[in-house]
Amino acid sequence: MRPILRKGDEGKEVQGLQELLWENGFVGADNPFWYSSVAKKYKITSPEDDKAKRFWVDGDFGSWTLAAVIDAQQRLIGPHKVPLDEVTQPGVVDLDTWWALEHITPDEQNQGIVEDASNVVTDGLGHAISNVWDHYIGLKVHEIPNGSNRGPYVNPYWSGMDHGGIDAWTGYNPAKKAKGPAWCCYSRCRIEWEANGVVYGKGGYIHAEKRVGLCYSNMKWGKAQDSKQLEPFISPKYLKGWVVDKKHVISGDVKLPVGTCAIMNYGGISGHTFTVVGFIHNSKGRLVYVITREGNISNSVGARKRRLDQSSLKWFVVSPLLFAKPDFVGLQETKAQFSGDSEHTR
């Protein structure tokens, strides 16, 4: 049986843990290692450097390993089909965390999600967004190589949309041979654009023109939008622009449409984003879970069931287009909207 590990532990088991974290792509661009004295001394700036793994996998459960474990717990699902950050102590490698790290494939991570049939939408933009997600989940789109945030495999699916050789989902630029940015937001934006029938750079439901990789920026952008566009559907007292705080959804005062953008926050500007495509209520009619479609989870696209009371789930960005009539055809003729932020972080 695997031991429970935490910060301060040392030895071969920690080294094995570090190997899993490294190979599975959880040593992200914001890991403290890249800013450490070791990295500076040996001029290590990315995983492309052959020296990087040798120094990172050192058998010492310190701040570098802690950050990677927390990253994994925020992105993986455990053996009971529940996201790790709902059931684990942050940074503590328990049996559920070990299982997730050792069962990392898209098939193992995207375990069967049963949707609440009473909430399935059969027309409109939200349904189109859900269908596009499911198309790419069916194709098992994932990073190549695993853990790299790279996706040159995507180009055949979106012919002509690689925009100068930079991958449309991950921002990976093969010409620079660079590791791509975290791509949860990139993938969600691309899905929304395709569901809209939008050509790259011509407009979009939440972001356009620039691929945006900063989830916190999505929330800020949403707050700057005109709430009057949503007031026929959602009371203005629950709105800040197009943003709804989670507490208003828990209370039942706001009913989210399928296709809503969700924003998670792990502290500061670090977070995750995904699309809400369904809902699960308890026997008393209280909304307990949201069914999701997500990019950059276990290095792939997939489905999740997330508890609404998950502490890192903070806001929902609701486009008025999600309430539009079913024959909505997209924004091809409208002026492109900009977030003004193209930072490459989650």
Image: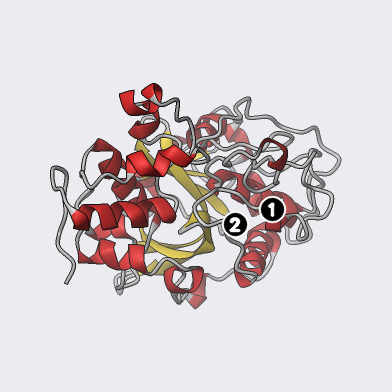
Q: Is residue 149 above or below residue 64?
A: below
Q: Are the residues tagged 2 and 1 within 8 Å (C-beta)?
A: yes
Mark 2 residue crowding within 10 angstroms, few (<14) / some (14–19) / many (20+): some
- Tag shown at residue 187: none
On the rendered structure, is 207 left or right of 220?
right
- Sequence-earlier tag: 2 or 1: 2
Q: Is residue 165 depicted above or below 300 in this figure? A: above
Percent position of residue 244, x then y: 46, 41
- Residue to which mark 1 is pinned: 152
Which image quarter: residue 179?
top right
Where residue 334 appears, x then y in whole percent? 82, 37
Q: In the image, what residue occupies the spot 49% across and 52% down? A: 147
**Element type at marker 1?**
helix
Q: How is the image coloured?
A: secondary structure
Q: CA distance from mark 2 to mark 1?
A: 7 Å
Question: Quick check: 208 above or below 14?
Answer: above
Image-based side of 255 in relation to 21, left or right:
right
| Residue sitting nearer the eye, 99 or 242 | 99
Residue 177 lies in quadrant: top right
In the displayed structure, does residue 234 sit left or right of residue 283? right
| Residue position for label 2 | 144
Task: Judge whether residue 237 can be spotted in this image.
Answer: yes
Query: Could you tell me the amino acid type at mark 1?
Result: Pro
For badge 2, the amino acid type reads Ile
